[in-house]
Amino acid sequence: MKFDRGIIKWQPFESVNSSKETIQSLLLEKSKIPKPILSEEEIKDLEEKIINCYYSKELVKIAYYQDGFIKNIQGKIIKIDHITKMIYLNNQHKVYFNQILNILI
């Protein structure tokens, strides 16, 4: 006669699942990079590109820094908020000026 242990036989694997999540979060933290520092000239060039793209309604690709990673978004600049220093794109994205690293037209 065979005895089924039911859920008891799977209990040792519970520790494997929790350690897997911990390892993944540690690897994510390890892969983060520090924010690149832009020179005053690079910042001025970015500001000019932003203004030119806003008035020309061109499609732009923006590289920005967020939470340890460099991310890319694409869209048209529809609003520049000078008070909050934020740029709004037509695809519901918004980016702060100080996050932007590069703009490609």
Image (cartoon, rainbow, N blue to C red):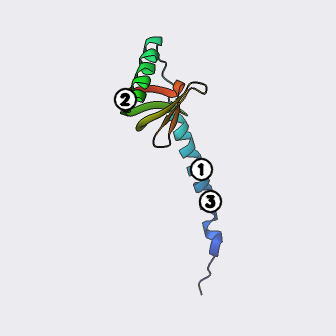
Pick the quarter of the image with the N terminus. bottom right
- Circle 2: is it few (<14), some (14-19), or many (20+) Cα within 10 Å? few
Residue 70 visible, this orientation? no
Q: Residue 63 carries which label?
A: none
Query: Mark 3 highlights which residue?
Result: 14
Local packing at callout 1 (Cα closer than 10 Å; few below 14, some 14-19, many 20+) is few
The answer to which of marks 2 and 1 sits earlier in the sequence is: 1
Residue drawn at point x = 57 percent, y = 43 percent: 25
Three-letter residue code for mark 3? Glu
**Where residue 93 appears, x then y in whole percent?**
50, 40
Q: Residue at x 39, y 24 (%)?
A: 52
Name the residue at 43% across, 21% down. Answer: 46
Q: Which of 92 and 22 is in front in this view?
A: 92
Which residue in the structure is indicated by mark 1? 19
Sequence order check: which comes first, mark 1 or mark 3?
A: 3
Q: Which of marks 3 and 2 is in front?
A: 2
The tag earlier along the polypeptide, 3 or 2, is: 3
Q: Which amino acid does label 2 sit on?
A: Ser
Is residue 45 depicted above or below 23 in this figure? above
Q: Distance between the residues labelled 2 and 1?
A: 52 Å
Q: Is residue 100 visible?
A: yes
Q: Mark 2 points at which residue?
A: 56
**Residue 72: % across, % down:** 42, 36
* Distance (Cα) linking label 1 and label 3: 9 Å
Callout 1, which amino acid? Answer: Ser
> Of residues 59 and 26, which is closer to you in this image?
59
x and y, in percent, of residue 29 in the image: 55, 36
